[in-house]
Image: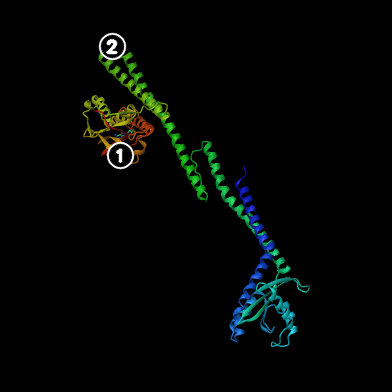
């Protein structure tokens, strides 16, 4: 596996090489032909622009402005230009090349004054006339010239008279220019190469350093170090990774603490009834064995403790089954009103001895679909908690609400006791979580009731939750899907 540094370096090198190669091909190889095309198109442009001044000349009109523009253009583009009428008399001249203009040598010695025709031009004009198109060009490499020359000629017909424009311009870049370009290219490529290497080194350092730091911290985490923080590192992606790893660390620590708590809780909850059983058994053996009243009392306590142990072990089993998903849910249609009635009924003994009223409100018109036994356990746990935490009104409300929009039957169990604070709410579903840590065993909870409810609801996909206000009320709910097969059977 290659390191980031190596890869970045390699990619940058490839990128720089390709760029330089393209620049080189364009500059050095394609430049001459590019230059020649440009030279031809410039010459064509200027020749086409000659129509106006020639028309002015033919009509004996003013053409100074056009002429000035022409001179400027020839200067900018290193061009020389001569225009003749059909009698080979020079009509217009714009020479930016000075003595290196080839036409200059051809024309100038043949004419004494501007009114004389240039006999040599007749032969060139004849050449132009023989062409099919009105314009024509050729290139020559004269012996005494350093670079090859472009000669261009165009014929204009103005007022039924022929006018001829002859143009000459260098057709090739000078070797010295190419040499300068090559030299420039060498400096530029060296600079770009050095810059590219520096950027790739800097980038790889910026990238690999925070990643190396993260991997070192992760190694510390694997070794069991707890108070670690994954540092952020200048890039959004690395920052996100660091945040995710920090979150994962928090969760790992939480699970670790939960595991420790769980073991402590289980051993504590098992030991307490066992100690009590052993103490009372000892009492019976040593003291109350012959006293039927005392013996009865002590035996009753032993039986209660055994029941509590039994409850605890069976809760633990249910929870582990639900969480490990080994037990299968038995999904069937059933009457939820009936189930709620039966559950309330089964608690009658407890509620009547404690003078607690369970009030049922509402009715579900359809059957529901779910695991009846498991749903009964959820409602039972909600009700048992409501009994434990019942308020001064000693009333528990059970509401049955049919939610047509979502297609669910909602069961709410409400008491007006201590309530649960906003901070505690998310935790009440955790195993062995007790809002009031001191109430311990007084209320005979196993500390697993809501954890079992959560496991059942998540397993069966039943929406569940709690709403509460401290010292006002607690409302625990579960929602079960309504059957689509019409009304329930009465
Ligand atoms: P426990 O056996 O301790 O009742 P649960 O899992 O059933 O265990 O409940 C967890 C915790 O949630 C309880 O200890 C209590 O602090 C809180 N709780 C549950 N139901 C209620 C309620 N109706 N009112 C107030 N607090 C409640």
Q: Residue at x 23, y 32 (%)?
A: 360
Which of 375/27 is in front?
27
Q: Which mark is residue 197?
A: none
Residue 234 in the image: x percent, y percent?
52, 51
The single residue placed furthest to the top in the displayed view is: 290
**For mark 1, what is the residue?**
467
Q: Which image quarter: residue 379?
A: top left
Q: Is residue 32 above or below residue 251?
A: below
Q: Are marks 1 and 2 in contact (CB under 8 Å)?
A: no
Location of residue 439 in the rendering, given as x and y in whole percent from the top left corner? 31, 31
* 309 vs 191: above or below: above
Q: Is residue 163 left or right of residue 221?
A: right
Determine which residue is flagged by label 2.
290
Residue 115 appears at what percent x and percent y? 69, 88
Query: Closest to the observer: 343 or 441?
Result: 343
Estimate the x, y position of residue 349 in percent, counting from the top left: 24, 24
Measured Cα–Cα span from mark 1 to mark 2:
53 Å
User: Looking at the picture, does residue 365 appear above or below residue 25?
Assistant: above
Q: Secondary structure at mark 1?
A: strand
């Amino acid at each position: 596996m290659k390191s980031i540094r190596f890869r970045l370096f390699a990619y940058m090198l490839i990128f720089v090489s390709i760029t330089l190669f393209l620049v080189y091909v364009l500059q050095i190889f394609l430049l001459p032909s590019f230059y020649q095309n440009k030279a031809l198109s410039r010459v064509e442009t200027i020749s086409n622009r000659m129509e106006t001044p020639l028309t002015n000349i033919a009509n004996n009109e003013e053409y100074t402005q056009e002429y000035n523009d022409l001179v400027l253009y020839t200067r900018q583009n290193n061009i020389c230009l001569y225009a003749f009428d059909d009698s080979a008399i020079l009509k217009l001249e714009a020479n930016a090349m000075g003595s290196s203009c080839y036409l200059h040598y051809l024309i100038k010695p043949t004419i004494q004054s501007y009114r004389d025709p240039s006999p040599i031009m007749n032969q060139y004009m004849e050449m132009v006339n023989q062409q099919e198109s009105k314009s024509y060009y050729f290139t020559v490499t004269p012996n005494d010239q350093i670079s090859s020359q472009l000669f261009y000629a165009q014929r204009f017909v103005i007022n039924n008279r022929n006018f001829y424009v002859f143009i000459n311009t260098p057709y090739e870049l000078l070797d010295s220019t190419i040499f300068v370009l090559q030299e420039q290219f060498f400096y530029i490529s060296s600079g770009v190469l050095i810059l590219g290497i520096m950027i790739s080194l800097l980038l790889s350092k910026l990238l690999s350093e925070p990643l190396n730091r993260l991997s070192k911290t992760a190694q510390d985490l694997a070794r069991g170090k707890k108070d670690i923080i994954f540092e952020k590192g200048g890039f959004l992606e690395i920052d996100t990774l660091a945040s995710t790893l920090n979150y994962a660390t928090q969760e790992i620590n939480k699970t670790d603490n939960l595991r420790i708590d769980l073991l402590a809780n289980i051993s504590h909850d098992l030991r307490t009834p066992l100690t009590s059983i052993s103490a009372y058994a000892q009492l019976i053996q040593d003291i109350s064995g012959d006293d039927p009243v005392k013996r009865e009392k002590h035996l009753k306590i032993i039986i209660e403790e055994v029941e509590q142990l039994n409850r605890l072990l069976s809760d633990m089993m249910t929870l582990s089954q639900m969480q490990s998903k080994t037990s299968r849910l038995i999904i069937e249609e059933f009457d939820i009103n009936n189930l709620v009635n039966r559950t309330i009924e089964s608690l009658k003994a407890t509620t009547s001895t404690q003078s607690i009223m369970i009030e049922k409100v509402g009715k579900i018109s359809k059957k529901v679909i779910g695991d009846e036994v498991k749903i009964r356990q959820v409602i039972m746990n909600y009700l048992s908690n409501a009994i434990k935490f019942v308020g001064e009104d000693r009333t528990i409300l059970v509401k049955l609400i049919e939610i047509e929009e979502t297609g669910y039957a909602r069961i709410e169990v409400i008491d007006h006791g201590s309530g649960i604070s906003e901070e505690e709410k998310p935790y009440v579903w955790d195993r062995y979580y007790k809002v009031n840590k001191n109430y311990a065993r007084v209320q005979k909870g196993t500390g697993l009731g809501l954890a079992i409810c959560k496991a059942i609801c998540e397993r069966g996909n039943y929406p569940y939750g709690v709403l509460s206000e401290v010292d006002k009320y607690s409302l625990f709910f579960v929602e079960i899907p309504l059957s689509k097969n019409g009304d329930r059977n009465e």
